[in-house]
Image: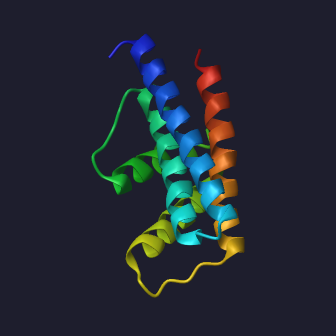
Amino acid sequence: MNNKVSKELANHRIAQAKEDLEAGNLLYEKNFYKSANNRAYYSIFHSIRAVLALEPIDFKRHKDVLAYFNKNYINTTIFPKPMGRRIQNASTIREDSDYDDEFVVDAKKTKEQLDTAKELINLVEEYIKSKN
């Protein structure tokens, strides 16, 4: 994959992340917290994949995407270390929201996930610009 295609893919993925975040915010406003958590997580996930598109590298499993990003971008402080914990938290909450029938999430926790997604989008956009 050439550099131009990698940047186009990165931009496509960040656009998807923004769409997921917007959907999450709309769901949050309607008090659909489980669904909003799902969209917040996918916003985070697509943001991470936007970064990986610049290498270019990708994985089939979410846990592999997250582990690679953590190892190569969080642990090396390309992205702030606290963001790594927030991403892991969002992944856990998304899994619980999607698969645990008894999981209850409140507005505060959901807002935290949406805020994490928004912050990561901003960081990723800065990173992509720095690579141009």
Quarter placement of the N terminus: top left
Residue located 45% across and 75% down the image: 96
| Residue 56 occupies quadrant | top left
Q: Residue at x 56, y 66 (%)?
A: 89
Count of labels in the image: 0
Q: Percent x, y for residue 29?
A: 69, 62
Q: What x and y, as percent, mark residue 47?
A: 53, 41
Residue 82, visible in the rendered structure: no
Q: Is residue 112 left or right of residue 131?
A: right
Query: Can you name the residue that lies furthest to the front here?
Result: 30
Q: Quadrant of the C terminus?
A: top right
Q: Residue at x 63, y 40 (%)?
A: 121
- Could you say which is closer to the camera, residue 90 or residue 111? 111
Is residue 47 in view? yes
Work out whether 100 lies above or below 123.
below
Kindly give the residue lying farthest to the bottom in the view shown: 102
Q: Position of residue 32 (x, y in %)?
A: 58, 69
Asked which colour scheme the image uses, the reply is rainbow
User: Compared to 23, does 79 lie above or below?
Assistant: above
Q: Image quarter for residue 5?
A: top left
Left or right: residue 75 versus residue 95 is right
In the displayed structure, would residue 124 be above or below residue 62? above
Rendered residue at 54%/34% (across/down): 14
Place of residue 36 in the rendered image (x, y in percent of width and height, measured from the top left): 57, 62
| Depth order, front residue of 84/48 | 48
